[in-house]
Image (cartoon, rainbow, N blue to C red):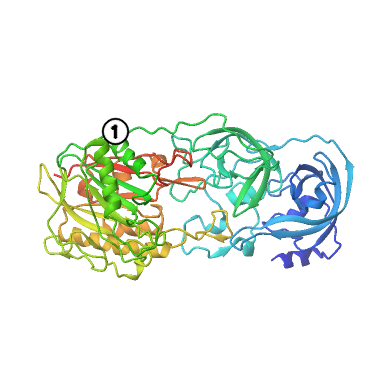
């Protein structure tokens, strides 16, 4: 595509580009890529240790074309000052550090730099005032309306090189401003900083999915392209590490840039928290009634919990003071007794005992537990950690129906009368779809008081998304790593649940855990349609913007879900407890939020 465009222009070595806009062109890739250009004129708007940025002095005033350009070369920075109008020659190059990233247009090997004037005044472009506002739903035309569509990576931006449509698509919007000095007014943090201090923000423009804490919740196929990350400050200062969701950062001025898989704004100097959001989340508004009329059920991914975990006492505190000692807790990421030490230990009895003992010491409430030890190093997670799903339960409120426990390789079955071959037992554990992944743990219970009506639980932790490509990346739709595997896991789990409901159409079934997927994406849609269960968020009529348990990049999102049989919908209560997503990185206990529900199981 690039060589074809160049041939149409009849360009060759030594060709001249009249404007920065011509170098950038109206597509993602420059038509001058690989060509030398001469007499490029621009105003220096910012300098870094490795280069500087120019703004065109003869703008074409088209929203589809950037008037900014990055000049790469540390030796050239000493020859110019901010406010200089200069003329120079150089080589146009498209640069990226990974084939999964988009390209950044650069003017490299700058020579013949002539300062024509100095001390020019200039103003940044105000996003949404001097430019259109960022689009709120779609990232790219190449996503065909669904940023999570399958198959992933069917197209590449670098191959298709579409004409920019910045009023419609998020990637196009930021690409149309690359190299420009801009200001975001009234920026709010919609993420925590990563290890480099980069933090995602929204400005004063219109957004979708705005939640009560000030973050942006992923809605349907809308993954919030209107957000932008704030990268490393140009002056070498450091952004704060304790920014959190909803913090007010005020106005931010910097250069639009692309690096490490994302469009970003490189601020002229470090950001600062002008007004901090409250990280305090109240205790759940309901609690167990102590009988079948009100059984409380929670779900919590406790992030690599083992007996030596520094965060174990904090998990205890959450369970006691915030979740109010639920009757039954679905746990994920429970490690074995030796944690990530790879020594062949697979039992987690000490891990679960430490958790139960901590709760009893804090609250006086006694818990028991049930899990099935995995085959060593076969269920994913940290090597040696042997993470598994487990149940923590109050024996004064619920009890397992008598049965024979299964082991790591025995497949549970639904028998006549909706009985389980193993209680508890794993769902099809030798199926290849569970390779390096946790197997669902199914159990049959009954309330201790008020009724002998049993209920079934399925505790899941589907395969990881690790290795997915960036929402701002070259593959379109972005690569949602493991989506095919999670779809098979969903089918396998849901088919087992469907067998329970086929044996007893009035059966009470609760499936919960870390599904590692969004509700609108194929694995969860497959799970719902095959199992016949309903989403607790829908049953409890949770506001769509408050449906999140995880914070990643620009999105508040739900990876953890609870699904129930239709006859459990009446009178349910449900809360996502944002005990971790609202915290600073240093103060979060787990990377997931827990959720709590209340059911009539009579």
Quick check: can you spot residue 148?
yes
Q: Is mark 1 on a helix, strand or loop?
A: loop
Residue drawn 26% across and 68% down? 409
Q: Name the residue under label 1.
A: 285
555 or 312, nearer to the observer: 312
Measured as percent of width and height from the top left, residue 103 is found at 66, 58
Q: Is residue 454 left or right of residue 146?
A: left
Q: 212 above or below 38? A: above
Q: Find the residue positioned furthest to the top.
A: 275
Measured as percent of width and height from the top left, residue 316 is found at 31, 41
Q: Is residue 145 left or right of residue 186?
A: left
Measured as percent of width and height from the top left, residue 515 is found at 36, 55
Measured as percent of width and height from the top left, residue 194 is found at 54, 46
Q: 284 above or below 337? A: above
Q: How many labels does the image show?
A: 1
Res 436 → quadrant: bottom left
């Amino acid at each position: 595509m690039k060589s074809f465009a160049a041939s149409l222009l009849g360009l060759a070595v030594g060709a001249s580009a009249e404007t920065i806009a011509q170098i950038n062109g109206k597509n993602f890739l420059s038509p001058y890529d690989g060509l030398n250009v001469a007499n490029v004129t621009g105003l220096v708007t910012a300098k870094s240790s490795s280069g500087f940025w120019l703004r065109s002095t003869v703008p074409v005033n088209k929203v589809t074309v950037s008037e900014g350009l990055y000049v790469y070369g540390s030796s050239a920075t000493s020859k110019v000052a901010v406010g200089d109008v200069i003329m120079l020659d150089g080589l146009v190059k498209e640069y990226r550090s990974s084939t999964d990233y988009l390209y950044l247009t650069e003017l490299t090997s700058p020579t013949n730099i002539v300062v024509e004037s100095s001390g020019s005044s200039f103003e940044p472009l105000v996003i949404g005032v001097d430019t259109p506002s960022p689009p709120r739903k779609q990232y790219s035309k190449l996503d065909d309306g669904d940023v999570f569509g399958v198959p992933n990576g069917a197209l590449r931006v670098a191959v298709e090189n579409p004409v920019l449509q910045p009023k419609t698509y998020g990637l196009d919007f930021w690409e149309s401003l690359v190299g420009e000095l801009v200001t975001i007014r009234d920026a709010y943090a919609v993420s925590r900083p990563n290890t480099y201090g980069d933090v995602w923000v929204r400005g004063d423009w219109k957004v979708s999915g705005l939640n009560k804490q000030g973050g942006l919740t992923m809605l349907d196929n809308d993954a919030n392209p209107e957000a932008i990350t704030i990268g490393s400050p140009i002056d070498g200062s450091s952004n704060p590490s304790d920014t959190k969701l909803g913090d007010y950062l005020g106005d931010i001025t910097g250069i639009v840039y692309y690096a490490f898989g994302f469009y970003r704004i490189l601020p002229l100097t470090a950001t600062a928290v002008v007004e901090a959001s409250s990280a305090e989340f109240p205790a759940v508004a309901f609690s167990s009634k102590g009988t079948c009329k009100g059984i409380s059920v929670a779900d919590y991914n406790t992030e690599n919990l083992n007996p030596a975990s520094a965060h174990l006492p904090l998990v205890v505190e959450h369970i006691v003071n915030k979740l109010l000692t639920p009757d039954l807790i679905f746990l994920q990421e429970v490690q074995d007794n030796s944690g990530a030490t790879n020594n062949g230990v697979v039992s987690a009895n000490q891990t679960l005992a430490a958790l139960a003992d901590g709760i009893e010491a804090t609250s006086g409430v006694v818990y028991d537990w049930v899990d099935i030890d995995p085959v060593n190093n076969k269920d994913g997670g940290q090597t040696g950690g042997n993470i598994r799903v487990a149940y923590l339960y109050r024996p004064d409120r619920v009890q397992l129906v008598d049965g024979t426990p299964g082991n790591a390789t025995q497949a549970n079955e639904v028998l006549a009368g909706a009985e389980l071959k193993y209680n508890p037992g794993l769902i099809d554990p030798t199926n290849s779809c569970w390779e390096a992944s946790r197997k669902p743990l199914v159990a049959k219970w009954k309330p201790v008081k008020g009724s002998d009506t049993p209920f079934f639980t399925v505790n899941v932790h589907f395969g990881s998304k690790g290795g997915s490509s960036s929402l701002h990346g070259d593959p379109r739709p972005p690569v949602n790593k493991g989506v095919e595997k999670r779809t098979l896991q969903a089918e396998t789990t849901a088919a087992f649940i469907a067998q329970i409901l086929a044996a007893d159409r009035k059966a009470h079934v609760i499936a919960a855990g870390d599904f590692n997927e969004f509700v609108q994406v194929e694995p969860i849609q497959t799970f719902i349609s095959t199992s016949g269960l309903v989403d607790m968020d829908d049953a409890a009529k949770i506001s769509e913007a408050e449906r999140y348990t995880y914070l990643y990049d620009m999105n508040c999102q739900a990876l953890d879900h609870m699904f129930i049989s239709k006859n459990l919908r009446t009178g349910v209560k449900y809360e996502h407890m944002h005990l971790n997503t609202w915290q600073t990185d240093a103060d979060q206990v787990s990377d997931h939020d827990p959720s709590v529900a209340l059911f009539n199981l009579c």
